[in-house]
Amino acid sequence: MPPKIFISIASYRDPLLHTTVMSAYSQAVGKDALVFGIVDQSFPGEFFNLHSLPFAEQVRYLRLDPEYGRGACWARNLAQSMWNGEQYYFQIDAHTIFNEGWDYLFLKEMRELEQYHQKPAISSYPHIFITIGNNIHDLKKSDYGGIIAHVVDPKQSFNNNAYIQPLGRVLATGPTVHGFLISGGCLFTHGSVCEEVPYDPYQYFSGEEPSYSLRLWTSGYNIFHMPNLPVFHHYGNAYRTTVWGDEFIEKNRPRKWYAYDEMSKNRLAEIVTGKQIGVYGLGNKRTLADYIEWSGIDYLNRTLSQEALTGDTLFKRDYKEKVGK
């Protein structure tokens, strides 16, 4: 019996949620080992019917009226609360599809990394799939290759408080590489992360990936980008509404989305300046200074090194090499 994988999905009025869940299940080798934790911010019966799934007993599901939704991080925090001791944690978005055997590939990669690292976290921006003519039943995966590693976009960084913008950099196919930034839409690590580094419900969207990367790394997790990621993500939103573009909901929302987003940016600034915010602050295994040295992202002086912009030296380091404490 393969180890249990808890799959966390935060969704906002997404027509592809059902497709995502079915793709994860149907393309898995160890189907019975999957447990889904879904937070669905939508109207009753709008896009997803739990009881239509032949594996509904493997799904933990919470639906919330969309006007009361408080963004991706808040929903991810709620999804993490559904974790019940499963060995591995896999966080994805509600518009994701998979290659056959995706679970076997992630588990194989984790077992290799676990030989050298106590807390590996595999994360990358997934490859692209599209909806042909915005038809959610007509999907096309990209021809993918290489490793999508994360660097920093200098044009969109340090403009708002301590917020930096991650950017995907495609590397030639090779062995797994060290990293310093995660993708919120594809993160595979130990299930214990739900207790050790719970998602910050007071963040909305902006700053999610820089904040969680920093908190993971200072909590002793090492970030890795693997080749041939068996996951695909829809990066457009023409087929769906969004939390920031839903005019109908925005009229009835108790607090406007941009107010939450501004709070989210301030939240990241509080974290990097050392404000004590309990379990949602920095970890205690490594320091902010350690992260600055490792990544080249200097939150205190608001500067980026060449390493942060290219990752050249870091991406050439052997994935077996131990780093930090």
Image (cartoon, helix red, strand yellow):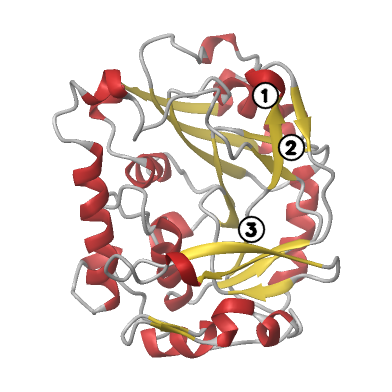
| Mark 1 Cα shell of 10 Å, populated few (<14), some (14-19), many (≥20) | some
First in sequence, mark 2 or 1: give its number: 1
Name the amino acid type tagged 3.
Answer: Ser
Residue 38 coordinates in the image, percent (x, y): 47, 31
Can you see residue 325? no
Quarter-wise, where is residue 34 in the image? top right
The structure residue drawn at horizontal position 74% and vertical position 18%, both measured from the top left corner, is 138
The answer to whether the residue labelled 3 contacts the one labelled 1, judged by CB atoms less than 8 Å apart, is no
Residue 171, compared with residue 74, is above or below; it is: below
The structure residue drawn at horizontal position 33% and vertical position 74%, both measured from the top left corner, is 282
User: What is the spatial separation of the Cα atoms under label 3 and label 1, in whole angstroms?
Assistant: 22 Å
| Mark 2 Cα shell of 10 Å, populated few (<14), some (14-19), many (≥20) | many
Residue 239 coordinates in the image, percent (x, y): 55, 22
First in sequence, mark 3 or 1: give its number: 1
The answer to whether the residue labelled 3 contacts the one labelled 2, judged by CB atoms less than 8 Å apart, is no
Residue 98 shows which numbered tag? 2
Viewer-closest of 78 and 167: 167
Residue 124 shows which numbered tag? 3
First in sequence, mark 3 or 2: give its number: 2
Helix, strand or loop at label 1? It is helix
User: Which image quadrant: the N terminus?
Assistant: top right
| Mark 3 Cα shell of 10 Å, populated few (<14), some (14-19), many (≥20) | many
Helix, strand or loop at label 2? It is strand
Label 1 belongs to which residue? 22
> Left or right of 182: which side holds 72?
left
Residue 72 coordinates in the image, percent (x, y): 39, 42
Name the amino acid type tagged 2.
Answer: Phe
Helix, strand or loop at label 3? It is loop
User: What is the spatial separation of the Cα atoms under label 3 and label 2, in whole angstroms?
Assistant: 14 Å
